[in-house]
Amino acid sequence: MQRSEKDKETRNWLEIAKRDLEAGRKLASTPDFSSQASFFSQQSAEKALKGFLLWHQERFKKDHDLRYLGDLALIRNISGYRPCPATQSLTLSKKDCSAFPIS
């Protein structure tokens, strides 16, 4: 995939993820729509991860499993995040991922 095509496709995934997140936030402000807010939040995370993996030229199967997509980013050592033994949360290492288009 050529750089401009990769940039365009990555930005497309991230733009859709951003819209899904905005929809989730709006739905979360209305108690009757909490399950729909959860759905759009999951969709946002999935699409952002797929854009991230695409940017780093990592192949992934057609899947909606956030654990699979997140683990793929961690296993491939491309995210710059490492599990923190003390808190079991993810922490950013010194690896620079600033080229990732997050605007």
Image: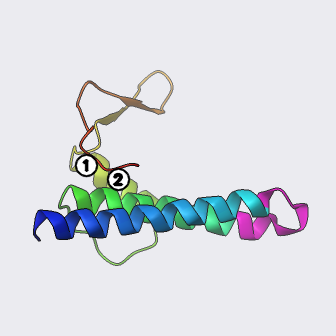
Magenta span covers which residues? 28-37
Could you tell me which quadrant the N terminus lies in? bottom left
Q: Which residue position holds label 2? A: 71
60 or 9: which is nearer to us? 9
Residue at point 41% right, 49% down?
103
Tell me the quarter of the picture where residue 90 sits.
top left
Classed neighbour count for the residue bearing mark 1: other residues with Cα under 10 Å, few (<14), some (14–19), many (≥20) = few
Q: Which of the labelled discs sits on residue 75, or is there none?
A: 1
Q: Is residue 7 left or right of residue 64?
A: left
Q: Neighbour class for label 2 at 10 Å: few (<14), some, many (≥20)? A: few
Give the amino acid at mark 1.
Ile
Disc 2, disc 1: CB below 8 Å?
A: yes
Which amino acid type is shown beneath numbered disc 2? Asp
- For the point 29% across and 70% down, which residue is it? 9
Residue sitting nearer the eye, 73 or 9: 9
Q: Judge from the rendering whether residue 17 lies leftward or rightward of residue 2; answer left or right.
A: right
2 lies left or right of 71 = left
Residue 8 at x, y = what percent?
Answer: 27, 68
Does dot 2 land on a helix, a strand or a loop? helix
Question: Where is 6 relative to 55, above or below?
Answer: below
Q: Based on the picture, tell me whether residue 30 belongs to the magenta stretch.
A: yes
Task: Using the image, determine if residue 80 lies above or below residue 15.
Answer: above
The secondary structure making up most of the magenta span is helix
Q: Quadrant of residue 19?
A: bottom right
Q: Residue at x 19, y 71 (%)?
A: 5
Does the magenta-highlighted stretch encompass residue 41?
no
